[in-house]
Image (tube, rainbow, N blue to C red):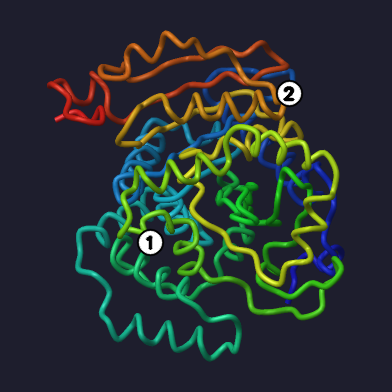
Amino acid sequence: FCLFHSFCQTVRLSHSINDEEIKYVKERKTLIKKWLKGQGIDCELDVPNIALLGSGGGERAAVGMLGSLHQLGQDNLLGSLLYMCGVSGTTWCMSSLYSDPDWSLNKRCDEVIKKLKGPTVDLSKIVEWLKSRKGLNQEFNLTDFWGAFTASYYMKEVSVCSALYRERVSFQTKPMSVHFCNLHLLSVGVWFEMTPHESGFSGLGAFVPTSCLGSQFDGGTLREKRKEMDMVLLQGICGSAIADGQRNNAEVVQIIWDLLGGKLQRSMLASLQDYNFLSTMVSKEKIHLVDAGLKINSPYPPVLRTSRKVDLIISLDFSAGDPFETVFSAKQYADELKLPFPSVKESVREEKDHPQDCYVFEGRHPEEPTVMHMPLFNLQNCQGEHDSGSVFT
């Protein structure tokens, strides 16, 4: 059953956020205003839109995001957040936390920590989950196996609950989550985001309700409603970067970069100005999502949508390589699409082998957001010499 029946019968074509998200933002900002007042800050004007970003980085990113959220909760700062966005390993943590409709971060964090320290899921439970997926008589492929492996081996859980349904129950009391993927199609890439309300291509302006994700559409109209995606499959899709572990990671990244870079990237971006690319995509029977970490290892594109009006981006970077790669990639992405983004001086790269714990790239308000960039591996956390790849020992 589609909770958003009023618009779930057709694909929504628009670059704006949907009515349900607009309603959420209004309610959430009322709570943020109360939180600010509780901190002794009377905000007469509109409260700032703050987004927390978590990069990819596999199990390290999942644990890093969990620890960061736990500390934000301890410091009573979670009440300031409007959005929480993740890619790859960070989404494993997010989906585990958000699977609880009565989300209590301290309690849920303790549960996740206990699971992470415990044994992997029993093989029989994994088989039962796979059998249930097969019994749905839907598309059944290696993504299901990968999702089961990701959830059971890394997050030590296999949950059959709907991926984003529970988030819709009472998520006004917590930051809205955005899961971020990349669509690989015709040797180019377009960004795909999943929120509690709808999922789709922000660059193309084409969305369907998340409860209808996986259903069949024909000519933009819903033809067959299928069961909502579950948490395990979501974790598998968002964490698919290491599914191709037989190939060298650097080689995979370089191949993707070459495909999306240069003239091809510019021609693709030009096509996003109309629906030529969309019509080409519609003609395909299947589309293939891959881990967005293979391109931009941090979910900047969703919060750079001008309709979300984000004022402050807090970027938690759990990458093992260049600690500034994500912010420079985001800057390039914004420049190519002519999206507001603060200036990032090239000279900051000189500190890549010995980064500080926090960098502030100040935006020209209200046109540009301000970015607070926080590398996990920095001089404060790791006060020794660094190893190859800028990973501190």
Q: Is residue 232 above or below residue 336?
A: below
Q: Position of residue 374 (x, y in %)?
A: 39, 25
Q: Residue at x 72, y 37 (%)?
A: 267
| Residue 48 seen in this snapshot | no
**Relative side of 72 to 120, left or right:** right
What element does badge 1 sit on? helix
Q: Is residue 194 above or below residue 332?
A: below
Q: Earlier in the sequence, mark 2 or mark 1?
A: 2
| Quadrant of the drawing holding the C terminus | top left
Front-lying residue, 295 or 365: 295
**Relative side of 344 to 355, left or right:** right
Front-lying residue, 41 or 184: 184
What element does badge 2 sit on? loop
Q: How many marks?
A: 2
Q: Residue at x 27, y 74 (%)?
A: 121
Kind of residue sitting beneath label 2: Asp
| Residue 20 seen in this snapshot | yes
Q: Which residue is mark 1?
A: 243
As measured in the structure, the alpha-carbon distance from the residue carrying label 2 to the one carrying label 1 is 44 Å
Kind of residue sitting beneath label 1: Ala
Q: Nearer the viewer, mark 2 or mark 1?
A: 1
Q: Position of residue 339 (x, y in %)?
A: 70, 26
Q: Position of residue 235 (x, y in %)?
A: 45, 62
State the residue lying farthest toward the front: 263
Residue 46: which numbered mark, if any?
2
Q: Is residue 365 above or below residue 316?
A: above
Residue 311, image quadrant: top right
Q: Position of residue 290 (x, y in %)?
A: 52, 56
| Quadrant of the drawing holding the N terminus | bottom right
Residue 45, image quadrant: top right
